[in-house]
Image (spheres, rainbow, N blue to C red):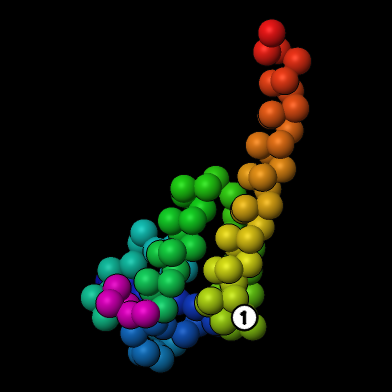
Amino acid sequence: MITHYMYESGKSACGRNNHNLAGTSDVKRVRCKNCLDSHRYQQGIWFSDFQNHTGTEPRGLLEWATGTMPFDTAAHHSLASYRAETASLADRLERQLEPLII
């Protein structure tokens, strides 16, 4: 059975609307060629890559997935949050490092 990329309460990225479709929001499990070629799927891949590379959950992902926030806003929100978190972490590590330098 072909697995479709699903979002926003059961919509498929390829546009099929049969209620008996096998679908997932997990980008790794999608097998429908039309879904794989869709813009919506590529946006889902960006969020997955963001999470894999940063180790943090993207901010705005849920809002994007439910259709309440456009992709660009959600992606920029994720990046801004990550930048703030990493800057704070770098500052803390630098403060801890200073007393160790002789």
Q: Is residue 80 magenta?
A: no
Q: Residue at x 37, y 90 (%)?
A: 15
Point out the stretch of residues depicted in magenta.
Answer: 35-39
- Which amino acid type is shown beneath numbered disc 1? Met
State whether the magenta stretch is mostly helix, strand or loop: helix
Question: Quick check: 54 left or right of 101?
Answer: left
Q: Is residue 37 magenta?
A: yes
Report the number of numbered marks. 1
88 displayed left or right of 16: right
55 over 72 or under it: above or below: above
Q: Is residue 48 above or below residue 67?
A: above
Side of 8 relative to 91 (left or right): left
Q: Quick one: label 1, few (<14), some, or many (20+) residues within 10 Å?
A: some
Identity of the residue drawn at 50% across and 82% down: 10
Is 82 placed above or below 23 here?
Answer: above
Q: Secondary structure at mark 1?
A: loop
In the depicted view, which residue is nearer to us: 64 or 92?
92
Q: Nearer the viewer, residue 11 or 91?
A: 91
Measured as percent of width and height from the top left, residue 102 is found at 69, 8
Which residue is outermost to the top? 102
Q: Residue at x 63, y 75 (%)?
A: 63
Q: Position of residue 30 (x, y in %)?
A: 34, 67
Camera-side residue of 24 and 96: 96
Q: Which quarter of the figure is the N terminus placed in?
A: bottom left
Quadrant of the image occupied by residue 74: bottom right
* Position of residue 80 measured from the top left corner of the image (x, y, whole percent): 63, 61
Determine whether 76 is above or below 81 in the image: below
Residue that appears at 62% across and 80% down? 69
Give x and y (percent) for residue 91. 71, 36
Q: Is residue 56 visible?
A: yes
- Residue at the spot of label 1: 69
